[in-house]
Image: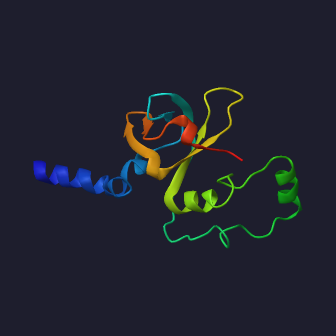
Amino acid sequence: MAQWLHSTGSMERGNDINRGPMGRVTDGMHVVDAVGEDIGRVELVQIGDPQATTTAGNEDRPPGPFERVAEALGGEHEPNVPEPMRSHLVRVGYIKVDGPHLLDRHRYVSSEHVREVVDDRVVLDAPKQNLVREH
């Protein structure tokens, strides 16, 4: 009986295990860097697409009049960083972090830098200054 329960638990978590700690990150989690500095909270989680070599062709259809207005008013395409970093983040996956202060810009964290997820906290293996800021 205990073996069946253990097996069932592993099956339910199988997808999370295959994706490493990134598979356990959810919106709203608290994020700290490698030295424990507060980075902010997870705003978006995007699992990577290892088959993507570039973001070209992955864009939506050409923008219509409403989309052009939204872009002019500050709308963005995720991740909102310059190439080649944008393609890299799409390939490996990332989290978008809303800074802890009102005037902080968003930061993007490559899945490669997510060291562990403990309770409601994402711990990174990189310092804050090495994280990509929103463009």
Q: Position of residue 135 (x, y in %)?
A: 72, 47
Q: Position of residue 108 (x, y in %)?
A: 59, 46
Pick the front one: 103 or 131: 131
Pick the front one: 115 or 35: 35
Left or right: 126 in relation to 60: left
Pick the front one: 27 or 19: 19
Instruction: Answer above or below: position of 115 versus 37.
Output: below
Q: Position of residue 69 (x, y in %)?
A: 88, 54
| Residue drawn at 45 percent across, 47 percent down | 113
Residue 1 at least partly seen: no
Instruction: Answer above or below: position of 17 versus 61.
Output: above
Residue 64 at least partly seen: yes
Chosen colour scheme: rainbow
| Residue drawn at 31 percent across, 54 percent down | 12
Instruction: Answer above or below: position of 122 versus 46.
Output: above
Left or right: 50 in relation to 131: left
| Residue drawn at 38 percent across, 33 percent down | 119
Q: Position of residue 57 (x, y in %)?
A: 67, 73
Pick the front one: 129 or 3: 129
